[in-house]
Image (spheres, grey):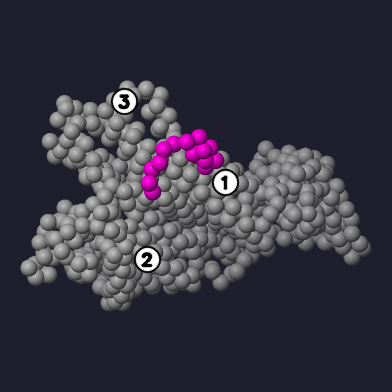
Amino acid sequence: MSLSKLVLRSMKKNMKHYYLYFFALIFSVTLYFSFVTLQNNAEVLATVEQSGTATAGFKAATYMLYFIVLFFVLYANHLFMKRRSKEIGLYQLIGMTKGLIVRLLAVESILLFLGAVVLGILAGFFSSRLFAMILLRVLEKEALVTMTFSTEALQQSIVVFAILLVIVLVQMAWMIYRVSLLSLFSAAKQADERVKRFSPLQMVIGFLGLIFIAYGYYASTKLFDINSQGNLTLNMIIILATTIGGTFLVFRFSVAFIMNLIRLKKNGHLTARDVLALTPIMHRMRGNAKSLTLITVLTGVSLGITTLAYISYYSSESSAYSQVPGDYVLLEDKGQEFLKKLEDNNITFDKSNFRLQSVSASFTQLLSESQQNKDNPLFGLEGIIYTIPLSDYQQIAPEASISDYDVILTNYGGYMAEMFPLEKDRDVVVTTGGLEGTEEETLHVKDVRHESIISGTVTSGPGGPIFVVPDALFEKLATHSGTSEWHKQTSIKIKNKSDSALAEKLYMQSNGEKYIESYEEQRKGNIETLGITIFTAAFLGLAFLMTTGSILYFKQMSEAEEERGSYTILRKIGFAEKDIMKGIYMKQAFNFGVPLIIGLLHSYFAVNSGWFLFGSELTAPLWIAMSCYIALYAIFAVLSVGYYKKVIRESL
């Protein structure tokens, strides 16, 4: 029989195995080709050309995506080869050499790759327009997206998957040449590692795994704590090492040990659910600790990156408002022509005028006692803090009341407020200076507030602190400074939001005046800057999620096939399908739920350690991202249960 006929017969016989591997290849090609096509889309390039980091971000994401695809395909090929191990062993028994078997499988792989690349490119071509529309939607851009076929994307995809094919062939040949004939007949039943008997030492090691994870979580909460000593990079490495190492120990020992204790507590009185759930969970999760650890870590990393990117995007409005606290901000009494245009077009608005003057103050006096150490960047730092009179502040906070030398510290927010919180009920000495020398005044901070009222242009960045002082004290400080001229800011809020579009159009016509700032322009600028980041992060997060979920699904399909004989026995001795499925439900809840829950915990503590560096909103972005991951994992779990149900029905 010729090699070509043998290949065709083999592929026909293994069609039920091939479709799984074939799907993995098509999915990988679709993801890669659609993403590369997106980078060469004329409408997308015209939209993001103002962002200097867009091209670099796309390239970095392309390399990361290729790593994901490489990992996915190699792992799927490894599982596929394990499922065909008996077939390969039979080939050797009938006299075929390992070299001939390698050529046979190589031809099959080449045909599969050719078919997958063709179908994946077609699917990627149609899906790329959808991804382009999503990107433009994220960027809030209006553009007509046409379906164009990119020859650059085609060439790049062919080269990349040709290299991947060579790597797969090398992996395949290495797996065939390194194993013995006897091991091929039991390869499908082998886990990542041989399971041994339990011992008290393993219980201790499993408990240490939980301690390692708990320490990693605790250390992450102190990562950006200014009072914590040590090198930031070293602390991050320690957190990663303890968390990942603890995860492996939990899978390797803790879960299996708990399941074994539950089984022993039943004194041998095991139900069908116990046989189909407790024992497989105990051995499978323990034996496959390496792969489960990898899946869990990938889930945590991808969810963490996606959440942080979404926090930045979700916080674009609040970040814009901290920079421009109003629909429009006019500095130094400029922009009067813009106000006249608003009035001429019957656009009603509220106007708040603020007078500001600067004083020098030491931030050390506002820090808590625990933060007053030399490692704190604010310790001993003297800087400029602007003051505004109470009467001006009462335009937005009528209830505010202070007297004598009491002050309200406001406008303090962002990551500075999270990392370096300032306390109320503390005294601070401020200094003013004029031609006749300097004067000092001791002020008492009555309250600390975080609402934004002054432009970030004035405070040299959003979130800069402002002192609200009584009017008499404001005049006194002005006398000390030797000047009656103050910085001025006018905040404009459009009363009727339906007039916002026209007002923004009038603002764009007055854009030559650099002393006028627009909240909408700042918000759109934030979105344009962060839109590419959130899109690429979400795209890579989807790829990571599909990879980990698919691998778990593939593993469950393999286990279902291995356990088909057990289901046949159970059905023959009288167990109904619903009785067997009770154990399957519990097993799948553990197989998908435990890696997901641990991955969610990893991502939560990772995000919680430094989310404030990326934005001002945490709860909503975190819950939205986690909900998406839970939903997609649930889909894979349902598919896995459906496959088990099919195997059980066919077992009798």
Task: Please provide percent x and percent y for residue 596.
Answer: 40, 43
Front-lying residue, 592 or 460:
592
Q: Which residue is mark 1?
A: 216
In magenta stretch: residue 647: no
Q: Is residue 652 above or below residue 173?
A: above
Residue occupying the point 11% across, 65% down: 6
Q: Separation of disc 1 and disc 3 at Cα?
A: 37 Å
Q: Amino acid at mark 3?
A: Leu
Q: Amino acid at mark 2?
A: Tyr
Which of the two marks, 2 or 1, is nearer to us in this view?
1
- Tell me where residue 175 sits by quadrant: bottom left
Task: Please provide percent x and percent y for residue 574.
Answer: 16, 26
Seen as rendered, the residue at the extreme left is 1
For disc 1, the neighbor class at 10 Å (few under 14, some 14 to 19, many from 20) is many
Residue occupying the point 38% across, 28% down: 263
Question: What mark, if any, has residue 418 been given in the picture?
Answer: none
Residue occupying the point 21% across, 54% down: 86
Q: Amino acid at mark 1?
A: Gly
Task: Please provide percent x and percent y for residue 199.
Answer: 47, 36
Asked if disc 2 and disc 3 are in contact, CB closer than 8 Å, the reply is no
Q: Which residue is mark 2?
A: 66
Task: Please provide percent x and percent y for residue 542.
Answer: 36, 55
Residue 409 visible within the image: no
Q: Separation of disc 2 and disc 3 at Cα?
A: 47 Å
Over which residues does the magenta segment extend? 193-209
